[in-house]
Structure formats: C-alpha cells, structure tokens
C-alpha cells in the first residue's frame, strides 16, 4: 500500500489506520518501559551475572544513551529508506535483542544486548511519529492520534516498575525483556497490512561523516549531564561536556555547507518549529528534576517501597491520559498558544505545592502536586509534538519527529542533571552540622545523599540514628523545595514565551498551515 503526494489534506483516517495506531501504541509502551523496567531487576541481575558497579550502570544507561544519540540519524534515515521499512527493521532488532538480553550469561553480553535495544529503540521512535504524520492527514485526527501515542509512552514509563515487580515475583529476571517479543512480532506481521510506506522522494545521499559527528556530539553530552546529576562534576564529566560541545559545533558547520544535510537547519528558521522545540525542551527540563526526585521522596522520606512509590505516582499518569482525551477537541476551538501557556501555569501551581512541602506533609500534597504538573504539561507535550511534525514538510516527517523526541530526551537529561545538582548542593549545606554521636567517616558518607544517610542510620543506635535521619530528611526536603521554586519559575517563563512568540498560531481542525518552512521537494513518495 502507498501514499500519494496528492492525498487530500482533509482525508480522514478509517478503521485500518486506527488499528495501525493501536499496534504502534503498544510499541510505544514497550519502548518507554525498557528505559525503567530494570530498576527492580538490577539486584537480581547483579546476583546472577556477578555484575560490577560500573557494569550495572552501563546495563541501565546504555539503552537511553543510544536512543538519545541516534534519534536524529534514525529520523533522517527513515525519510530516506521509508519509515515503515525502518519501523520493521527496528522491531526485528528490538525483538532479537530482547531475547539475547533475557538469555544473557554475563554482564558484557547483557550490556551489548541493551546497546542493540537502544539502537532499535532509536529507529522505532521517529518512525512511529513520522508514520502518524503521513497516515493522519486531518489535523483533528492527528492530534488525537499523537495524544494516544504520548499517553502510551507516559504510561509505559510509569507502569514499568510495577510490571517488572510482578514478573520478578513469578519468573527470573530475563522475563522483563521477553515481554517485548510478542508485540514486536505483531508489528512485523501487521505493519505491511495496516501502515502505508512513505519517504522523501529526493533525499540525497546519507552523509556518514555527519552521522558520526551527530553521535559523537550527543552521546558525550548526554553522558555528561547524567553523570553530573548522579555524581557531581568530575574530569570525565567535564571532558564529556567539552567533547559534546566541540563536535556539536563541527556538526552544525558541516550541515550548513551541505546540499543534502543530515540535519536540515533551514527548518529552524520557521518560528513555529524552533519556538515549539525550545518550549518543549524547557518544559521537560522543569519536569525532569521532579520526576527524578519524586520517587526518592516517597522511598527515602516516606519509607515506601519502589512498587508503593510507583502506585502513588499513578494518579499523575492517569490525569495525563485523561488530558490526552480532552485536549484534541479543545485544541480545535481555542488558540493553541493560550492552551499551552495555560497548561504551563497549571504545572507551575503544582511545582509551587512541591516548593511548600515540609516534614509534616503526607502523600496527599505530593499526589495533588504531581496531578497538577502532569495535567499542565500534557497540552505542551501533545500540541508541540503536533506543531513540530505538522509544520515540517511531509518528506521531512521523520526528521521532525526525531527532533521532537530529542528535545524531550535532552530536556529531561538537563533537568535531572541541573535540578539534581541543586538539590545535592542544598542537601550538603543542610548536612554541614551532623548530629553528635555520628562517627566522622559515617558523617562524611551521610553528607553524600539521603540514601547514604539511611544506610548509615541503620548501623547506628536508635537515638543517634533517629536524629541523623531527621536532619537528613529535612535537608533533602529543603533542596526539594528549591527545586520546586526553580521549576515553577521555569514553567511561568515558558508560558509567557509560548503565549507571546506563538500568539498567531491558531491552526485548528480546519487544516491551516502552522508556520513557515522551506519545502525541499515533493511532499511525499509512494514506495
């Protein structure tokens, strides 16, 4: 089946297309799950495979590193070879790598399998969004389809620890990987039947040096910000950030000199495209630190297990899913800039609640805050994704989808690194006076993090342990409050920028164009 360039913009998707969306949404759930599903399985993996500390970090992080590093390359590759074809290649690779991960006999084998999973995941994400841009030509249906997909991504990340815990209760740790195999097999079976092929008819050759430069630019940057959040500034972190910045400059210079660049910088001249991506990155920055720290608050301050913490965070995921159902019809009647800005103000109110929690605050305040944050962020994530994908030429749909996903990944990573570092600094200051009775070596360990303080407290007699935990939790909450203030200010600033810079973007379901862009050729190609 193929899609023609003459396809009417008002053509509405039918049962076949919506069935195809259901299959793609299942893939979205699994891609998101694979980033967090190992949280509970890592202790079992360590015991079974004898993984060292650095190996454990690579088992967990190599997937996310490669997804972030290869999104742009894969998005552009899909525009060249066909988005459905790349989707099927990614699904096949994901399925095979999942089996290899489940059957790993050593830490090195599992790290390699997770790396292949990251490469396959990078192929799947822009392919899915690029296909949606082609299949759902009607603007109202397209935003509804994107809402469904983004809800599945969010749900996948939220339920991964829960599903992982259930699987680990009945099976060995490899079962958390094998769950992906049936879904990927379903994609390989149904994609040729349900999804049309589409690609850029005149893409030019794929410039391999640009591919290499993009990977070397992104991977050290992502590594640097993640390590900065987890362990603070160090020589490897500094080198990663410097190397990433250097190769980013080299990459951009090369793209400006090429007739068929890997990254079409001309698209950024369109205000809709560039401002929308910037707003998405800033919004994800604000939420990244909170999503990183909230599970720690539940587990280390309120003494909840990982599964219990996940359950307390589910209401926020639920409200995001509800907003995904509500936003599409509203977006057809109200200016999108005001809808996004209003959502950011709601999110700022949620961050404000987090800035006011104290040692006496219970679960209710945190749950309400997260509901407000995710409800407020939903319009930004959903509408910006639609704006970015729709404002690019159809033959660049894969690239536009990759840029949207890259903004999300980079924004989250920067938020975790920056806001995590802020909390660590405030926590360290609050732990400057450790209670009397704590040995010097143990005091130094307790100053590192609240998790370390909990470990130290378990080795101390009760009065001293209680005093240490009280001090450490108060210091953590003080840092958490500061993160809430920064996130609220960021959300308000983003709201003002969106309302002003995108004030004339009033596209509705009637199909008006969303912004200026340079068209490099015909809009689509039948394959």
Image: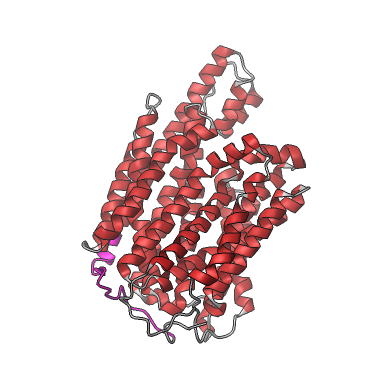
Q: Residue at x 45, y 53 (%)?
A: 152
Principal secondary structure, stretch drawn in magenta = loop
Question: Can you say whether 202 is above or below 160 in the image?
Answer: below
Farthest-out residue, left: 333
Q: Residue at x 57, y 78 (%)?
A: 81
Question: Can you say whether 370 is above or below 103 in the image?
Answer: above
Q: Is residue 40 magenta?
A: no
Q: Position of residue 214 (x, y in %)?
A: 58, 70
Can residue 158 be seen at all in this image of the molecule?
A: yes
Q: Position of residue 104 (x, y in %)?
A: 75, 49
Q: Position of residue 420 (x, y in %)?
A: 50, 43
Left or right of 241: which side holds 507?
A: left
Q: Residue at x 74, y 37 (%)?
A: 47
Near-viewer residue (104 or 373): 104
Can residue 249 be seen at all in this image of the molecule?
A: no
Near-viewer residue (120 or 253): 120
Q: How many marks?
A: 0
Left or right of 348: which side holds 214?
A: right
Q: Position of residue 164 (x, y in %)?
A: 58, 41
Left or right of 279: which side holds 468?
A: right
Q: Quadrant of residue 185?
A: bottom right
Q: Is residue 516 magenta?
A: yes
Question: Can you say whether 79 is above or below 149 in the image?
Answer: below
Q: Which residues are magenta?
A: 498-520
């Amino acid at each position: 089946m193929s899609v023609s360039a003459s396809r009417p913009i008002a053509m509405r998707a039918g049962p076949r297309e919506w069935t195809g969306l259901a299959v793609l949404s299942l893939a979205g759930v699994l891609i998101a799950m694979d980033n967090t599903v190992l949280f509970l399985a890592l202790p079992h993996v360590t015991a079974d495979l004898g993984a060292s500390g650095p190996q454990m970090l690579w088992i967990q992080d190599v997937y996310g590193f490669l997804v972030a590093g290869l999104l742009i390359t894969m998005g552009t590759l899909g525009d060249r070879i066909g988005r459905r074809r790349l989707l099927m290649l990614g699904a096949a690779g994901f399925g095979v790598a999942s089996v290899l991960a489940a059957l790993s006999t050593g830490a090195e084998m599992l790290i390699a399998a997770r790396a292949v999973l990251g490469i396959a995941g990078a192929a799947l994400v822009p392919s899915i969004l690029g296909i949606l841009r082609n299949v759902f030509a009607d603007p109202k249906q397209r935003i509804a389809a994107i809402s469904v997909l983004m809800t599945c991504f969010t749900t996948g990340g939220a339920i991964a620890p829960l599903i992982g815990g259930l699987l680990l209760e009945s099976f060995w740790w490899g079962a958390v990987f094998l769950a992906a195999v049936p879904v990927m097999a379903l994609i390989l079976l149904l994609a040729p039947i349900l999804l049309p092929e589409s690609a850029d008819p005149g893409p030019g050759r794929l410039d391999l040096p640009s591919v290499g430069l993009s990977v070397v630019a992104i991977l050290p940057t992502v590594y640097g910000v993640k390590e900065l959040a987890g362990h603070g500034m160090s020589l490897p972190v500094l080198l990663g950030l410097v190397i990433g910045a250097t190769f980013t400059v080299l990459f951009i210079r090369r793209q400006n000199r090429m007739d068929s660049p890997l990254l079409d910088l001309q698209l950024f001249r369109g205000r809709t495209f560039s401002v929308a991506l910037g707003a998405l990155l800033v919004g994800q920055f604000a939420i990244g630190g909170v999503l990183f720290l909230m599970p720690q608050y539940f587990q280390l301050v309120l003494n909840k297990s990982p599964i219990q913490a996940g359950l307390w965070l589910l209401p926020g995921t639920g409200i995001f899913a509800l907003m995904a159902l509500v936003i599409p019809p509203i977006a057809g009647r109200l200016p999108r800039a005001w809808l996004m800005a209003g959502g950011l103000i709601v999110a700022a109110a949620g961050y404000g609640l987090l800035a006011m929690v104290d040692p006496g605050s219970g679960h209710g305040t945190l749950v309400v805050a997260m509901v407000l944050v995710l409800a407020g962020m939903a319009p930004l994530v959903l509408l910006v994704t639609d704006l970015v994908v729709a404002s690019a030429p159809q033959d660049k749909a894969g690239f536009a989808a990759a840029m949207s996903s890259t903004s999300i990944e980079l924004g989250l990573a920067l938020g975790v690194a920056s806001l995590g570092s802020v909390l660590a600094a405030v926590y360290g200051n609050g732990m400057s006076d450790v209670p009397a009775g704590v040995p010097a070596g143990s005091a130094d360990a307790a100053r590192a993090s609240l998790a370390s303080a909990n470990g130290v407290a378990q080795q101390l007699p009760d009065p001293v342990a209680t005093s240490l935990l009280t001090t450490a939790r108060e210091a953590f909450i003080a840092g958490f409050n500061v993160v809430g203030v920064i996130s609220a200010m960021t959300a308000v600033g983003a709201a003002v920028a969106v309302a002003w810079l995108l004030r004339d973007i009033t596209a509705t379901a009637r199909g008006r164009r969303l912004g200026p862009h340079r068209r490099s050729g015909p809009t689509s190609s039948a394959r």
